Amino acid sequence: MHPVRKQRLYLVLFVVLFSSAAAGLVMYALRGNINLFFPPAEVAQGKAPVGKPIRVGGMVMDDSVQRSDDTLEVRFMLTDYQANVTVVYEGILPDLFGEGQGAVASGVLDENGVLLATEVLAKHDENYMPPEVAAALEQSGYDHKGNAK
Amino acid sequence: MIPEFGHFALIIGFCLAIVLMTVPAWGAWRRNTRAMSLAPGLAVGLLVFVAISFACLCAAFLQDDFSVKVVAANSNSLLPPIYKFSAVWGNHEGSLLLWALILSLWTAAVAVFSSQLPLLVLSRVLSVMGGIGVGFLSFLLLTSNPFARLLPGTPADGNDLNPLLQDPGLIIHPPLLYMGYVGFSVAFAFAIAALLGGRLDASWARWSRPWTNVAWAFLTLGIMLGSWWAYYELGWGGWWFWDPVENASFMPWLAGTALIHSLAATEKRGLFKSWTVLLAIFAFSLSLLGTFLVRSGVLTSVHAFATDPARGLFILVFLALVVGGSLTLYALRAPAVTSRVSFEWLSRESLILCNNVVFLVATLTVLFGTLFPLIVDALGAGKYSVGPPYFNAVFVPLMALLVPFMGVGPVSRWKKDSARRWQSELAIPAIVAVLCGFTLPLLNASYNLWVALAVTLSSWLVLGLCRDLWYRVKGASTLWRGLRRITPSYWGMFIAHLGFAACVTGVVATSQYNIEHDLKMSPGDTEVLAGYEFRFVELAPVRGPNFIADEARFEVRRNGRIVARLAPQKRRYTATGQVMTEAAIGAGLFRDLYVAMGEPIGQDGAWAMRLHYKPMVRWMWLGAILMAVGAFTTVLDKRYRRQRSTAAAGAANEALHGA
């Protein structure tokens, strides 16, 4: 084979091998690390899997936030005004977390339908609502401030 | 009056941009020298009017003109003046105006500093920049006018700037980031101009290289500042979240890194020409995509601001025009510019190719992870999110793969090299690097295999560089003379690669050795972290210019000696009532001590506290600064200023034969 062609062949082989290795890596990494969003209504209907990482988002219900007196455990309810999901989180909540505000919690559902959250999503801006939460509220006929339309 | 004046200046700027886009391009097409020579003047005029417009918006902010909508929404009479100034770009409209300002700054800079460029090329480049300017200025004027008034209904006071943005880091972070983002438009414009002219050669690479390096340096600094800001301002001690908006700035950086390396091969050896052009298009398209992601709010992100769908659509159409147009042009013109230069398997060219493949694959994987939720959602398959573990799992191995090649790079020769030479040059660095990897992590309390690997890889880089520097200096009569002989280009590479090594070490060490405790603490309590004794001394109320705060005072002791006094705060901003955590950091070259307040627990004055011990976290940012310094250094090289005669001859040649 002509040396230039041979070089080109090696080059193409290298690129192909490398890209397929990368693609494989991407698939492998993606499998374990994506999680699906569920509005509280779907969690209540039992559509969300138990024991798998998911995200649940909605408004934090008024008067639902309970803090433990001696640990960092916090319990609160997320609602889309159709159903509620209880969330348990141990740790420090983001600054803009509050009752009557939108929030997204990611974690694992236990058998009782309680979300054991490992992360509660913060937002940077008071007027900002995570798009999933806005869509979930939209479905149950509320605007992003939690007022019925 | 001032805001209307600013609006008017913006409209004039828009008109100038239209003229800049069309007339010199027409001139270049018809070989009309008068039309072409209008370009530099128009570019400077564009800068003047956009700058006037920007100054008017600044004036509106500084004078608390709350009849202007963005001022009312983003400023407050109690806001310290410096933050009133940075509030100008702490919102959608203002940040776009800043974008337009920086674009016209780059355009004018190309016009002023390119006296060596042939007029034909210069007019094409400036026309393309003018076209981008038209896009952004029409976006500003049509969808996001920063000078819109609230008349009647002017509020008595403003809504205040988002407290997270009231921070010194945020005063310079957006301008630097935009300097980088928009700077790639210069590389893009040069690429398009070259495609239009059908001439891609070493002189083209030499012209666009300094611009690309400077843009890349600014982008590096911008990303570094963003990461630093997130670290001390967001209050949870992370420095990189693989958040879509961070990715939006990171993807152009990755593509830009590939670009600056392939430009080197194009300049030195006339290789990879069409590939380099494609990378330039790619890098700028990713900048635009980043703007789209940030400004349209399509992705869930901790950075996203409330948005308007019309804006997203506008940028999407603009993006489609730029990407579609430039790729079409590429498809039509690129086959004409293939290179006929060959190189051996073992050569610097191959190593640069490795760099390009790794960075391109890294860009694509980040792009995929960022867009995956959007694509799946558009297909109606559910609302997924892709978390940091995905990005880490993909990105870390790619970078680990890169470093072994990177160590050989500086030592290698163009065109043809031999394995035997590499062996004799690098055997000692390799052995010493492995030894360093095994021994240096022992200095820490716990041995960690990942850190050992990172130290091995970065010492491999550093030792390879030093070995090469030694060979370059060795022949000279004195050390000083030897060092003087080395070109700024080489120094730039040297410093930037050192920075990369520091960055790798910092990232891995801080991720592996980081210790984080979230716990309940009352005044008087003590907690020990990695040998540091954190004592919560007292809680005190504090009053700031536009906030009130609870301040927790900490003393940190090591072996009985006080090493830091930390005072984190929990602030409540009076205008909005927004609560914000202000972390306190005891910074050091080898470790950071980090304390942030959570919320009060129970009735006895106890608080949730977040304590961190973060070793070598500064190395990451210092490394990024070194990379930027390196990229700036390369521009000082003399060869970028001495090409006038050859360039002019080339252009005359082109004009003679017709493009």
Image: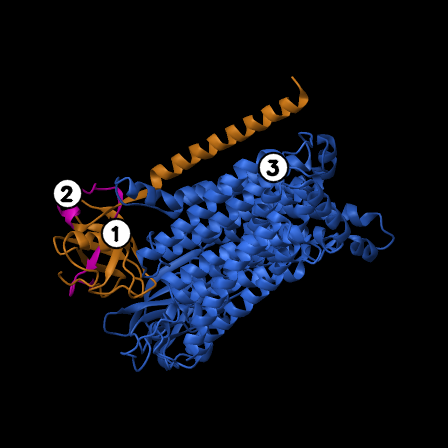
What's the amino acid at mark 3? Answer: Leu
Residue A48 drawn in magenta: yes
Inspect the image, locate mark 2, and give the three-letter code of the amino acid beneath it: Gly
Residue type at the position of mark 1: Glu
- Residue B21 disc label: none
Q: Quadrant of the N terminus of chain B?
A: bottom left
Secondary structure, mark 3, is helix
Start-end of magenta stretch: A41-66
Q: Is residue B368 left or right of residue B264?
A: left
Q: Nearer the viewer, residue B128 or A63?
A: B128
Return the residue at label 1. A132
In the figure, B361 relative to B613: above or below? above
Choose mark 2 or mark 3, whichever is in front. 3
- Badges 2 and 1, same chain: yes
Question: Residue at position x 55%, y 43% from top?
Answer: B279
Which color scheme is applied?
Answer: by chain
Say whether disc 2 or disc 1 marks the residue closer to the N-terminus: 2
According to the rendering, which colour does chain A have? orange
Of helix, strand and loop, which one carries label 1? helix
- Measured in 3D between alpha carbons, the distance from the residue under mark 2 to the one under mark 1, in whole angstroms, is 19 Å
Residue drawn 35% across the image and 58% down it: B304
Can you tell which chain is drawn blue? B
Q: Which mark is residue B353?
A: 3
User: x%, y% of residue A98?
Assistant: 24, 65
The span from disc 2 to disc 3 (Cα, nearest Å) is 52 Å
Element under disc 2: loop
Q: Which residue is mark 2?
A: A46
